[in-house]
Image (cartoon, rainbow, N blue to C red):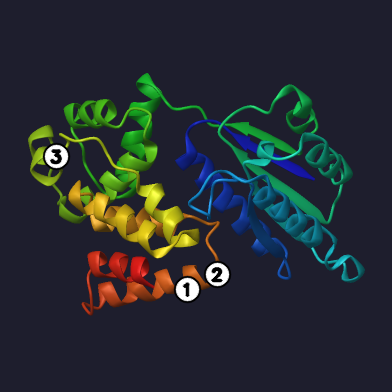
Amino acid sequence: MIIYLYGPDSYRRQKKINKIVEEYRKKYSGLSCDFFDFDPSIGSGQAPSTSSGQEEFNRLNEFSGQGLLFDVKKMAVLKNVFEIDVKLMKEFFKKHLTSEDFTILISENVSPPKEFDFLIKKAFLAEKFENLEGERWRFYIQKESRERKINLTSKAVDFLADVYAGDSWGLIAELEKISLFAGDSAVDVVDLKKIGDYGYESPDIFGYINAVIRGDLPRRIIALEKLFVNQEEPVKIFNIFASLNRLPKDLIRKLADYDIMVKSGKLDYEEALLDLALA
């Protein structure tokens, strides 16, 4: 079985992935789930390599065959699947297209190339996540604000809609920050400007996250330093980091431990991010 999620709005796409994985885990108590990224540039800090994609495919192929004798339900969450050999991936997908015990959840920024049209046509579920615009974008901001008990004025909604157009990750992180300061009264533009700094371009948070997951020490330190220099909120970085469902299990546990220590006053988010970079 194949599920294909695609489109530039990676936040809403990731949220859908998290929901599907959670539902599968509730439905199948013995579910075996793993995450695979075929981006050849991740991890080495050097030029892209075809071998890294091949190694990831070998790992996926091995995972797909595990547990067949014991009727184990499996799910593989894939990213950047069009970065490696077309024939190889095509054969793999067609082999598992109608499998009831093995679900392939694919997450991509774009529609599949012509060779992979069948991924949408024959998928159990195919859903597109375009960047929201206009009234749909404003309605989304209002909905997410209400969920965090934030009462935004219409001008504040318009302001955030303009500032974070096409950047739902940035919007959600900002709403999380606003929720820490917002009371029962309405939040207007003047209040937003007291809370946040909207005069700079957001640095590459995911550069730091990828460096922590797979990079070497210099890359981690440099990426974090850039975030701090640009005055990116540590709580924003940490929350985006913790929301990713594809993280290794040991890293997920470590983030949970950091969160407990921060909330108990033993350290702050900046110290947690630095410790992650140095670990």
238 over 145 or under it: above or below: below
Looking at the rendered structure, the secondary structure element under dot 1 is helix
* Residue holding disc 3: 192
- Residue drawn where x is 41% and y is 48% of the image: 206
Chain-order first, disc 2 or disc 3: 3
Residue 78 horizontal side relative to residue 277, left or right = right
Q: Nearer the viewer, mark 2 or mark 3?
A: 2
Instruction: Please tell me the numbered disc located at residue 253.
Output: 1
Amino acid type, callout 1: Arg
> Rounded to the nearest whole Å, what is the CA distance between mark 2 and mark 1?
6 Å
Q: Nearer the viewer, residue 83 or 47?
A: 47
- Residue drawn where x is 26% and y is 45% of the image: 174
Q: Are marks 3 and 1 in contact (CB under 8 Å)?
A: no
For label 3, the crowd category at 10 Å Cα-Cα, with few meaning under 14, some 14 to 19 and many 20 or more, is: some
- Residue drawn where x is 75% and y is 33% of the image: 119
Q: Are marks 2 and 1 in contact (CB under 8 Å)?
A: yes
> Rounded to the nearest whole Å, what is the CA distance between mark 2 and mark 3?
36 Å
Where residue 16 sits, quadrant-wise, is: top right
Residue 238 horizontal side relative to residue 25, left or right = left
Q: Nearer the viewer, residue 156 or 241?
A: 241
Amino acid type, callout 2: Lys
- Horizontal and vertical percent for residue 154? 20, 28
For label 1, the crowd category at 10 Å Cα-Cα, with few meaning under 14, some 14 to 19 and many 20 or more, is: few
Instruction: Please tell me the numbered disc located at residue 249.
Output: 2
- Horizontal and vertical percent for residue 10? 48, 39
Looking at the rendered structure, the secondary structure element under dot 2 is helix
